[in-house]
Amino acid sequence: MMIQPISDRQLRYWFNRINRIAFDGRLHAAFEFKNFKDGGAAYTEKVRGKDIFYIAINKKIRYSPSCTIISLAHEMIHVEHWSWGHGSRFQKRMLQVIRRAKLEKFL
Ligand SMILES: [Zn+2]
């Protein structure tokens, strides 16, 4: 079996799909694969004082659809609720997003 990395096009597909199904299409964010100097799967940046968000996904996890899609969904919740951090309501929302967008197969 050929192992293929997730492409930029597929990343865009999944962002749009998860946004439409689990966030009612409300999220606005730039997103891309990026070479990370250090570890970590993904992060989100917010432009100070503005509702402008940027999601970076570590290029090294492209070969794992599970890591990539779940990390993307995780970062999308940060965009939706920037102030939340990773508390229990974040975890609840994560499960809701996974169920709504039918991402269980990526867990
Ligand atoms: Zn996080």
Image (spheres, rainbow, N blue to C red):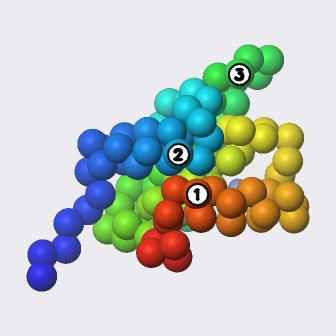
The amino acid on which the numbered mark 3 sits, given as a three-letter code, is: Asp
Q: Marks 1 and 3: CB-CB under 8 Å?
A: no
Q: What is the quadrant of residue 23 in the picture?
A: top right
| Disc 3 secondary structure class | loop
Q: What is the quadrant of residue 89 in the picture?
A: bottom right
Residue 9 is situated, as x and y percent measured from the top left of the image, at: 27, 42
Q: Which mark is residue 73?
A: none
Mark 2: few, some, or many residues within 10 Å (few <14, many ≥20)?
A: few
Q: Which mark is residue 100?
A: 1
* Nearest to N terminus: mark 1 or mark 2: 2
Q: Nearer the viewer, mark 1 or mark 3?
A: 1
Q: Which mark is residue 51?
A: 3
**Ligand 1 position by quadrant:** bottom right
Q: Is residue 84 left or right of residue 105?
A: right
Q: Nearer the viewer, residue 71 or 23?
A: 23
x 68%, y 60%: residue: 96
Q: Which mark is residue 21?
A: 2
Above-or-below relation of 35 to 70: above
| Disc 2 secondary structure class | helix
The amino acid on which the numbered mark 2 sits, given as a three-letter code, is: Ile
